[in-house]
C-alpha cells in the first residue's frame, strides 16, 4: 500500500504474463505506464494486442522500436560487408539474441528515469525457466544494482511472477478479478490466434495446462469451502 | 600476454580516448573488432572519422544504428500521442539520456557474445568524471557481473583509461607508438574540426591542455635522462 503513491513502468508484450503484471501494477501503484518493444515480432498481432489492452486498461503505452536487435542477429553479423545493416521488412533475420532481457530491461530503466517512475515491473519467471539465464532472479537483482549505479538512482525491479507456476499466474489473475479478461484478450499462440489460441502449439498447450490445473484446484477448493 | 590468443570488441567513437583504446587492444589481443553507435551524432564526421580509423588500423567495424535513443529523449516522451516515434533526420531531439553507457555497453556485450569475443574494451574514465555516474568504475564492475549473469558467460570489461588523466592518455598513446596518429586522425572538437580542432571549444581546450602537459613532462624527462 505504501507504493500507491508512486509510478511504475510495466514491460508489456500483450501476453498472459505481462498482462497479469499490468493489472498487478495497477493495484500497487498510483500511476502505471506500459512499454512494448517492437522488434519485428512474428505476429504483428502481438503489438496490436498490446495496444488494445493498454487502451482498454487506460495506461499510457510506449512502443519502442527495437528493430536494431536485427543488427545483432547471427546472419547480420557474419556478412562480409563492413557495415552491419538492418534486416529488411518481411525478411527479418532471427531476432533472438542472448541477453535480450538485459537490453529490454535496461531500456525500461532508462525510460523509467525519463518519465519519473521509480518502479519497473516485469513478468520474467524462474519457475518456467527454459534455459534463458536472463530470466533468473539472480540476474534481475544484479541488473537492479547496475541500473541504480548507472543512473545514480534507486529504481526497484518487481517480478511478481518470479516463483509462480503457470497455474498460480492464472490464480493471481483471478485474485485480481481479471481471469476472463486475461484469458480472452491476450495472445500466447504461436499461430497468432488470440485467447485460447490454436490449442495445438507448445505455447497453447502450456497455457491450457496451467489454466486447467488452476480451474481444477479452484473447483476442489470450492468443494472444501461449501 | 596471456590475452594474446583471445578476441576483443572495442567500443569506438573515433575520438582520442577510444582510438587509444583500439591501439591498446591491438597490443593485447589476437583479434580486435570495433563497434560504433550511430545515434545521430551532432557531427556525422564523427562516424566517418571512426570508419577511416578502423579501416586504417585494419579491424572489422560494426556500426550499430542506435537512433532509437531518440525515442527516449525528453521531448519524444512528453508528446501527447500514445506511440513514441523516432525523431526525423535533421530535427533530432537531444539524444542525451541518462544510463546511455548502460545501453551501449550492454549492446557491446551482446555483440561480443555473438561474434565470440570474451573481452570488451571501453575508454570510460573516472578521473575526468564529469557527473556521469555510468563512467564510474563501480558501475562498470557491476555491469560486468550483470552481463555475465545475463548470458551465463565470462566476459571481461577492460577500462585502460579508467584512472588516467588526459596527459596520461597521451602518454599511453605515445608508449603505443601512435601519438601522432591519434593527434592527427581523431575528432574531439565540438565544431567538427579533426586533429587539433578549433582550439577554442571546451573539448579542444581540454585535449590541448592534456597534450601540452604530457609534451612538457616528456621534455622534462628527456632533460633528466640526457
Image (spheres, coloured by chain):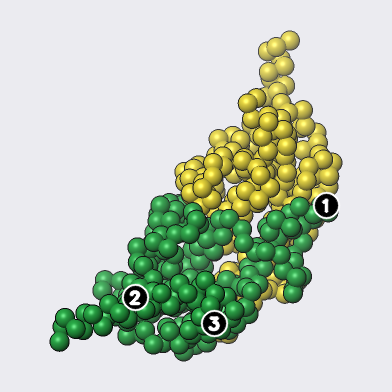
Chain colours: A green, B yellow
What distance separates the C-alpha of mark 2 from that of mark 1?
Answer: 51 Å
Crowding at mark 2 (Cα within 10 Å: few <14, some 14-19, many 20+): some
What distance separates the C-alpha of mark 2 from that of mark 3?
Answer: 19 Å
Give the residue at x 37% y 84%.
A179
Which chain's residue wears label 2? A
Give the residue at x 68% y 38%.
B7
Counting residues from the N terminus, which is met first, the one under dot 2 or under dot 1?
Answer: 1
Q: Secondary structure at mark 3?
A: loop
What distance separates the C-alpha of mark 1 from that of mark 3?
Answer: 41 Å
Q: Using the image, determine if residue B135 lies above or below residue B93.
A: above
Quickly name the residue at label 2. A213
- Is residue A122 shown left or right of residue B156? left
Counting residues from the N terminus, which is met first, the one under dot 1 or under dot 3?
Answer: 1
Which residue occupies the foreground of this view, B81 or B153? B153
Counting residues from the N terminus, which is met first, the one under dot 2 or under dot 3?
Answer: 3
Give x and y (percent) for residue B210.
67, 36
Quickly name the residue at label 3. A198
| Residue A80, numbered circle | 1
* Whether labels 1 and 3 share one chain: yes
Amino acid at each position: 500500500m505504501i507504493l500507491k503513491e508512486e509510478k511504475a513502468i510495466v514491460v508489456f508484450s500483450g501476453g498472459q504474463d505481462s498482462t497479469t503484471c499490468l493489472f498487478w501494477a495497477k493495484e500497487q501503484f498510483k500511476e502505471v505506464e506500459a512499454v512494448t518493444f517492437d522488434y519485428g515480432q512474428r505476429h504483428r498481432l502481438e503489438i496490436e494486442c498490446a495496444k488494445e489492452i493498454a487502451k482498454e486498461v487506460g495506461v499510457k503505452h510506449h512502443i519502442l522500436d527495437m528493430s536494431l536487435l536485427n543488427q545483432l542477429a547471427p546472419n547480420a553479423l557474419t556478412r562480409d560487408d563492413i557495415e552491419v545493416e538492418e534486416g529488411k521488412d518481411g525478411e527479418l533475420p532471427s531476432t533472438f539474441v542472448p541477453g535480450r532481457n538485459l537490453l529490454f530491461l535496461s531500456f525500461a530503466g532508462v525510460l523509467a528515469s525519463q518519465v519519473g517512475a521509480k518502479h519497473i515491473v516485469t513478468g520474467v519467471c524462474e519457475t518456467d525457466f527454459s534455459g534463458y539465464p536472463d530470466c533468473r532472479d539472480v540476474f534481475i537483482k544484479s541488473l537492479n544494482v547496475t541500473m541504480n549505479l548507472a543512473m545514480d538512482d534507486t529504481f526497484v525491479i518487481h517480478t511478481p511472477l518470479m516463483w509462480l507456476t503457470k497455474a498460480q499466474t492464472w490464480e493471481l489473475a483471478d485474485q485480481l478479478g481479471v481471469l476472463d479478461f486475461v484469458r480472452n484478450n491476450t495472445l500466447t499462440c504461436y499461430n497468432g490466434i488470440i485467447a485460447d489460441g490454436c490449442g495445438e502449439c507448445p505455447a497453447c498447450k502450456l497455457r491450457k495446462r496451467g489454466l486447467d490445473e488452476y480451474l481444477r484446484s479452484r473447483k476442489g477448493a470450492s468443494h472444501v469451502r461449501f
